[in-house]
Image: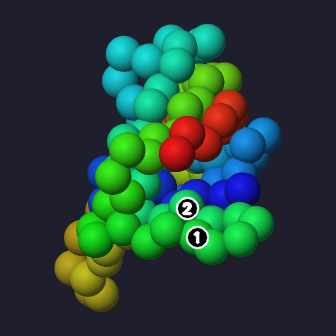
Amino acid sequence: MYAVVDDRNQQYRVQAGDRIQIHLRKGAAEGDAITFDKVCLVGGEGAGRIGTPHVAGASVTGKVLRQVKGPKVITGKWKRRKNSRRRRGFRAQYTIVQIEAING
């Protein structure tokens, strides 16, 4: 059985046992349970259910494994012959979640 969940306008296809990387959940510690209530689709053996926009009564539960930082992205701007340069770095933060069960 699999499901497509919507987490803050990002959709993920998950199965029980999968590990997904979502945007940082502040206040979520290691071992905390997370419930995804916005389930767009539930599929698997037999007929699947498609939500309009979400499947009623369906949810996906997961457990927070850890919080990590992504790779560094460096951006820069410059103007020729003006001695004008700017460099800026950015590292996105993510939460790694282990999917426990698909309910409904």
**Quadrant of image for the N terminus:** bottom right
Farthest-out residue, front: 46
State left or right for residue 29 relative to residue 84.
Answer: right
Q: Which residue is mark 2?
A: 42
Q: Is residue 69 visible?
A: no
Q: Which residue is mark 1?
A: 48
In the depicted structure, whether residue 2 falls above or below residue 37: below
Q: In x, y percent, where is residue 4?
A: 52, 62
Q: Secondary structure under badge 2?
A: strand
Which is nearer the eye, 60 or 81? 60
Q: Is residue 71 visible?
A: yes
Residue type at tag 1? Gly
Quarter of the view holding residue 88: bottom left
Which is nearer the eye, 80 or 27? 27
Q: Is the Cβ of the residue at disc 2 closer than 8 Å to that at disc 1? A: yes
Q: How is the image coloured?
A: rainbow
Farthest-out residue, bottom: 80
Rounded to the nearest angstrom, the CA distance separating label 2 from label 1 is 6 Å
Q: Residue at x 33, y 52 (%)?
A: 56
Q: In x, y percent, where is residue 93?
A: 48, 39
* Number of other residues with Cα within 10 Å of mark 2, as a class: few under 14, some 14 to 19, many 20 or more: many
Q: In x, y percent, where is residue 3?
A: 58, 58
Residue type at tag 2? Val
Mark found first going from the N terminus, 2 or 1: 2
Q: In x, y percent, where is residue 46?
A: 71, 71
In the depicted structure, whether residue 36 falls above or below residue 56: above
* Number of other residues with Cα within 10 Å of mark 1, as a class: few under 14, some 14 to 19, many 20 or more: few
Q: Residue at x 37, y 44 (%)?
A: 57
Which is nearer the eye, 12 or 94? 12
Q: Secondary structure under badge 1?
A: loop
